[in-house]
Amino acid sequence: MQNEYEIKKEMCEIGRRVYDRGMVAANDGNFSVKLNDNEFLCTPTGVSKGFMTPEYICKVDAEGNVLQANKGFRPSSEIKMHMRVYKERPDVNSVVHAHPLYATTFAIAGIPLTQPIMPEAVIALGCVPIAKYGTPSTYEIPDAVSEHLQYFDAVLLENHGALAYSDSLLAAYHKMESLEFYAQLLWQTMQIGGPQELNKEQVEKLYEIRRQMGLKGKHPANLCPNAKAGKPSCHSCGGSCSSAAPTADAELIASITKKVMEQLGK
Ligand SMILES: [Zn+2]
């Protein structure tokens, strides 16, 4: 098991990767690691995450209050968002927030990533919803993110960036990489006529693979509100995963309306 200093070193390494891959500009982005129920390491505000050393890393409690920080460093103001994830997802040990170019482009355009275009993205992420816009450093962002936490391990933040979380720092970072690659592929194919989507059957086979692999975390293969209601989920649910509200009722109403309309001969 890693000791605290080793975790801080790993956080610096992940910071370098996030910065080198252009997932953040200037001093943007932040990430955190859970040590135990009341101690969390987090990156400081106002520094480039590409050039951190272990002394930069701060420690906070479950409310985000500073437990330890070296002179000149204080936790990110977005720490509230991280704390909400840990509170509502006890299986999560690390949260990564960044502004990757393509994922953020979709977040700004208000387009969730719901098109099934490649097996890896379908298995790793399912589709990626958008948490509605919130003012940075307020509780608006945690509240918006909270709506998606039980269904997904990665979300876009409207007009802002992206958030990924998992059972380890490396896994959370990899989720962010996969999310950005998915967004980039989608963007690229949109330039040449749009992607060919995988069909429902192909998606369902991939979901089955994920279930058999027993992958950890939340994924619409298991937890899409529609899947829970025994209906087609995620990629085949018409993008309802972009909305926080469970869609079972909406679908029921739609199908009843359709039947009534049919009976009326229209
Ligand atoms: Zn941000």
Image: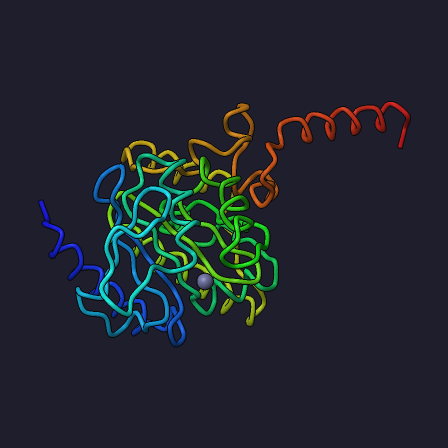
What residue is drawn where x is 38% and y is 60%? Answer: 76
On screen, residue 107 versus residue 76, left or right, reads right
- Name the residue furthest bottom: 26
Q: Residue 14's x, y, as percent?
A: 24, 63
Image: 253 above or below 25: above
Count up the numbered dots.
0
- Name the residue furthest front: 71
- Quarter, ligand 1: bottom left
On screen, residue 221 versus residue 193, left or right, reads left
Q: Nearer the viewer, residue 5 or 218?
A: 5
- Quadrant position of residue 126: top left
- Looking at the figure, which quarter contains the N terminus? top left
On screen, residue 34 versus residue 6, left or right, reads right
Q: Residue 83's x, y, as percent?
A: 38, 45
Q: Nearer the viewer, residue 67 or 11?
A: 67
Image: 177 above or below 4: below
Q: Residue 123's x, y, as percent?
A: 37, 44
Q: How is the image coloured?
A: rainbow
- Looking at the figure, which quarter contains the C terminus? top right
Image: 227 above or below 82: above
What residue is drawn where x is 27% and y is 73%? Answer: 50
Q: Residue 221's x, y, as percent?
A: 43, 35
What residue is drawn where x is 29% and y is 74%? Answer: 20
